[in-house]
Image (tube, grey):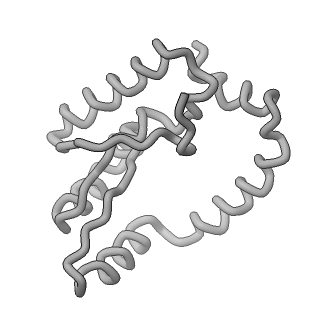
């Protein structure tokens, strides 16, 4: 399936230099558990009654539904971020549409209302 190879294709198309710095950056970020990051965001926004939109991939929401529910319980928004975190720039229009449909269906099955969308890597075609 092409979706599973999209990340590898992106390496061939000039992203090689970005991969190692991005990997190191993500490893540093992910040393902090996501539930701790959520708590920090909630504490920072609560005094101002500000709300945050969390772009969430459906596959992550399915793996950790309790984190997605915590976002909603705190009054924040969950936005579709695709089914998996794959750069849409390396997918056909049909593959992109299928990924978005699959994500929306997964959120619906979970009872998670979603209104917004943010493409993975903020890469739109």
Of 114 and 63, the residue lying toward us:
114
Is 20 left, or right, of 56 in this rendering?
right
Res 125 quadrant in image: top right
The vertical placement of 77 against 49, above or below, is: above
Q: Quadrant of residue 27?
A: bottom right
Q: Nearer the viewer, residue 46 or 26?
A: 46
- State the image coordinates of residue 78 (x, y, percent, origin top left): 28, 51
Q: Which residue is situated farthest in the bottom direction here? A: 47
Q: Quadrant of the N terminus?
A: top right
Above/below status of 90 relative to 124:
above
Residue lying at the far front in this picture: please name it. 125
Residue drawn 40% across the image and 19% down it:
97
Q: Nearer the viewer, residue 108 or 77?
A: 77
Image quarter of residue 67? bottom left
Q: Position of residue 98 (x, y in %)?
A: 40, 18
- Name the spot of residue 66 as percent of width and height, x first: 27, 56
Q: Residue 22: x, y in percent?
A: 71, 54
Residue in the image at 79% along x and 29% along y = 13
Say whether residue 71 is left or right of residue 82: left
Query: Total label count?
Result: 0
Residue at 56% in and 34% down: 86
User: Which residue corresponds to the image point at 58% horizontal and 20% vertical from the top-left?
Assistant: 91
């Amino acid at each position: 399936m092409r979706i599973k190879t999209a990340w590898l294709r992106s390496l061939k198309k000039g992203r090689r230099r970005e991969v190692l710095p991005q990997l190191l950056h993500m490893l540093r970020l992910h040393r902090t558990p996501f539930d701790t990051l959520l708590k920090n965001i909630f504490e920072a926004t609560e005094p101002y009654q500000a709300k945050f939109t969390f772009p969430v991939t459906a596959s992550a929401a399915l793996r950790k539904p309790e984190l997605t529910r915590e976002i909603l319980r705190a009054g924040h928004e969950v936005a579709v971020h695709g089914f998996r975190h794959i750069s849409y720039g390396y997918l056909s229009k049909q593959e992109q549409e299928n990924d978005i449909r699959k994500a929306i269906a997964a959120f619906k099955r979970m009872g998670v209302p979603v209104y917004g969308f943010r493409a993975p890597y903020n890469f739109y075609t």
